Image (spheres, rainbow, N blue to C red):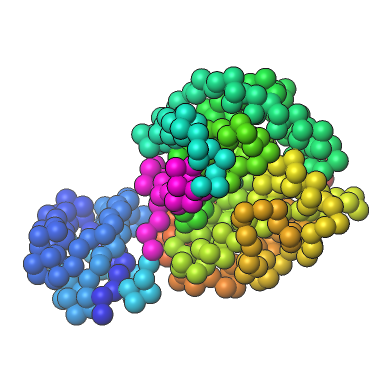
């Protein structure tokens, strides 16, 4: 049975490096211990007489590991060797991005609803449309982390399609959209070029969102796999299509398009509570089993895409699929469909179809309430043997699976609690 192990090696860096460099080189580990180094971290040691702490993650069998530990402990320059934890690889660990730049590898598409393949797609018989859609979608294939999102010179027909949806939705927003959406909508019109006469550029909307919640956009070529899409949310990144739906069907698109993203998703990703909920869904998905990913995708469907909430005795929409579809928005708030209270255990396994209006919607009391219920449910049910945390300064995700990381988190939380206490004290006097 193979195991992943964390060990820490304390030692004088100069002398230790020679010994460690030999013992832990790929060649030596492979030849002598049948293992390999998966991760190395060094930092100045807090103890006098010891230069550095070294944290090493090794993929190795148990017996060679014991031999390796013995060999390392014989090194005269090494102060101590400690085994921090073991993870048995019989619990198969799914790869997930640890740094925001690794989202460059999270762009796997689903071959569903594409105009080239789906006969029911409104653009299936329109060669010119398919070529134009492909031209814009291709931007996503060459996009890399850190690039500005290339601007698209939208054609008049595309702008007219955007304008038709924009005008219809704007009539319904005051009576059908939740308060948070209505508030950001006004700011988008004022500060971010939201008008019926032009399609906002992803780069501009991304900068707007970043200032408000830290969320950014990156271009996507179409409908992504749930695992890749959810993983990006963990980094406050929203993978966003840039092409426009077919002009013959302005109020419905079988696949995500820029109208759905910019009218449905962008306003709420620029709202702190919704941004936090989206990120927590993403963080929960990292390292999840396929079965759990399916549940998270279903949860996403009934909340971020088609969620309803209560507001001053009324029901309002907060789902992007509703807030970008004039017809379904009116349908969802009518008496026709069924409605249930949001409950993660029920919502996450509710079957749904994606071809027509939904016949069931879930209502949350507030987004904060939905988030709290979701958080409790994931903590109780997720199978991964570790917790993860987003570190905004380095835009990376940490697995909280070592004493050092827990100490760092404790220190950071202690500092925040002290700041909170101080703020409360200052407000009292
Ligand atoms: Fe969506």
Q: Is residue 101 magenta?
A: yes
Please state which of residues 192 and 320 is positioned toward the viewer in this rendering: 320
Residue 353, horizontal then vertical, whole percent: 62, 60
Residue placed farthest to the right in the image? Answer: 313
Q: At x 65% / y 50%, what residue is drawn?
A: 305
Q: Quadrant of the N terminus?
A: bottom left
The total number of labels drawn is 0
Residue 246, horizontal then vertical, whole percent: 58, 34
Taking the image as shown, residue 426 lies to the left or right of residue 201, namely: right
Q: At x 77% / y 33%, what residue is drawn?
A: 168
Q: Quadrant of the C terminus?
A: top right
Taking the image as shown, residue 401 lies to the left or right of residue 342, namely: left
Answer whether residue 215 is visible to the viewer in this image: no
Q: At x 55% / y 20%, what residue is drawn?
A: 155
Tell me the quarter of the picture where residue 16 sits. Answer: bottom left
Taking the image as shown, residue 262 lies to the left or right of residue 20, namely: right
Tell me the quarter of the picture where residue 257 sits. Answer: top right
Image height check: is 137 above or below 55? above
Q: At x 19% / y 80%, what residue is drawn?
A: 63
Please state which of residues 121 and 34 is positioned toward the viewer in this rendering: 121
Q: Is residue 282 magenta?
A: no
Image height check: is 171 above or below 395? above
Report the predominant secondary structure element of the magenta stretch.
Answer: loop
Answer whether residue 197 is visible to the viewer in this image: yes
Residue 283, horizontal then vertical, whole percent: 52, 56
Residue 395, horizontal then vertical, whole percent: 46, 44
Please state which of residues 279 and 49 is positioned toward the viewer in this rendering: 279
The segment highlighted magenta reads 94-118
């Amino acid at each position: 049975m193979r195991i992943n192990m964390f060990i820490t090696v304390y030692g004088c860096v100069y002398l230790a490096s020679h010994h460690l460099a030999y013992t832990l080189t790929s060649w030596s580990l492979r030849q002598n211990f049948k293992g390999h180094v998966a991760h190395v971290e060094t930092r100045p040691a807090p103890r006098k007489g010891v230069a550095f702490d070294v944290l090493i993650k090794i993929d190795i069998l148990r017996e060679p590991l014991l031999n390796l530990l013995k060999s390392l402990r014989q090194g005269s320059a090494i102060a101590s060797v400690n085994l921090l934890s073991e993870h048995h690889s019989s619990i198969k660990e799914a790869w997930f991005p640890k740094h925001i730049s690794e989202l460059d590898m999270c762009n796997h598409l689903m071959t569903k609803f594409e105009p080239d393949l789906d006969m029911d797609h409104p653009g299936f018989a329109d060669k010119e449309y398919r070529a134009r859609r492909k031209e814009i979608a291709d931007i996503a294939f060459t996009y890399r982390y850190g690039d500005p999102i290339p601007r698209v010179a939208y054609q008049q027909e595309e702008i007219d399609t955007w304008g038709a949806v924009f005008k219809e939705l704007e009539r319904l927003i005051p009576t059908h959209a939740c308060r948070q959406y209505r508030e950001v909508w006004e700011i988008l019109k004022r500060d971010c070029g939201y008008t019926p006469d032009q399609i906002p550029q992803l780069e501009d909307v991304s900068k707007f969102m970043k200032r408000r919640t830290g969320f950014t956009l990156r271009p996507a070529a179409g409908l992504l796999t749930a695992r890749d899409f959810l993983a990006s949310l963990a980094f406050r990144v929203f993978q966003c299509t840039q092409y426009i739906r077919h002009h013959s069907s302005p109020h419905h698109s079988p696949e995500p398009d820029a109208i759905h993203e910019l009218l449905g998703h962008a306003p709420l990703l620029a709202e702190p509570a919704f941004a936090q909920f989206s990120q927590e869904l993403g963080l929960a998905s990292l390292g999840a089993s396929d079965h759990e990913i399916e549940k998270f995708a279903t949860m996403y469907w009934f909340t971020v895409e088609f969620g309803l909430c209560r507001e001053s005795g009324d029901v309002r929409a907060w789902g992007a699929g509703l807030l970008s579809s004039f017809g379904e928005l009116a349908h969802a708030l009518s008496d026709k469909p069924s409605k249930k209270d949001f409950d993660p255990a029920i919502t996450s396994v509710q079957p749904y179809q994606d071809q027509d209006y939904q016949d069931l919607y879930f209502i949350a009391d507030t987004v904060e309430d939905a988030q709290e219920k979701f958080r409790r449910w994931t903590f109780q049910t997720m199978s991964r043997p570790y917790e993860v945390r987003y570190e905004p300064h380095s835009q990376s995700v940490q697995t909280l699976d070592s004493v050092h990381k827990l100490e760092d988190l404790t220190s950071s939380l202690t500092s925040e609690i002290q700041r909170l206490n101080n703020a409360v004290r200052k407000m009292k006097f």
